[in-house]
Image: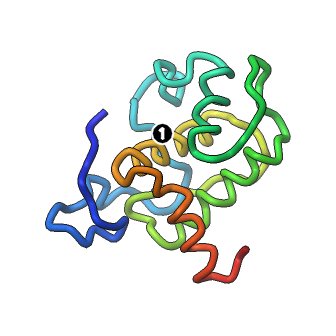
Amino acid sequence: MATHNYRSMRGASSQRSPYRGMPSSGFPPNRSGMAAGYNTALWPNSYAVRKQLRELGYMVPLGNSPLVNDTKVRSFQKDYNLLNGHYSQEVPGRLTVDGVAGKHTLNAMEWAMLADQSWPNYWGWYVDRASRSRGAR
């Protein structure tokens, strides 16, 4: 997966975001195009999903059981939607906040992962920044 050297999610650097023109409403797009509706290479099992959530700062316990009605997944979903409101070109689509790590949440995690790689360790920073500007936290 390619990384990009952006200064901010608004594209303040000379490089333009490759996600310009993506839909800002609806569910997060399936970047992989895989028939399952999400990237099965990234998310082959629940352990991989849990590990990535932890890397993004959502400290779910490691294990192999599916994440259903999970408060940390809800937090990720809320944060993703919050960032969509501020950076809809780079964080496309919106999630249903249900606590289930289903295909739409997995697609959102792939977008979040890409953002975190493009702006190392900034996922949490951008969530915090967007929360404060909206008074959400």
Label 1 sits on what residue type? Glu
Callout 1: helix, strand or loop? helix
Q: Residues within 10 Å of mark 1 (few under 14, many from 20)?
A: many
Instruction: Report which quarter residue 94 is drawn in.
Output: bottom right
**Residue 11: percent from the left, percent from the top?**
27, 68
The residue located at (37%, 65%) in the rendering is 9
In the picture, measured across the screen, residue 108 lies left or right of residue 20, that is: right
The residue located at (75%, 37%) in the rendering is 60
**Residue 68: percent from the left, percent from the top?**
82, 34
**Residue 115: percent from the left, percent from the top?**
41, 51
Q: Residue furthest left?
A: 14
Residue 88 lies, with reference to residue 121, above or below; the image says: below
Tally of numbered tags: 1
In the picture, measured across the screen, residue 90 lies left or right of residue 21, that is: right
Instruction: Report which quarter residue 61 is drawn in.
Output: top right
Indicate the quadrant containing the N terminus: top left, top right, bottom left or bottom right. Answer: top left
The residue located at (82%, 47%) in the rendering is 71
What is the basis of the colouring in this image? rainbow
Q: Residue furthest front?
A: 121
Q: Nearer the viewer, residue 23 or 8?
A: 8
Indicate the quadrant containing the C terminus: top left, top right, bottom left or bottom right. Answer: bottom right
Which residue is the site of mark 1?
A: 110
**Residue 131: percent from the left, percent from the top?**
63, 74
Residue 3 lies, with reference to residue 44, above or below; the image says: below
Instruction: Report which quarter residue 134 is drawn in.
Output: bottom right
Residue 41 lies, with reference to residue 68, above or below; the image says: above
Residue 25 lies, with reference to residue 3, above or below; the image says: below
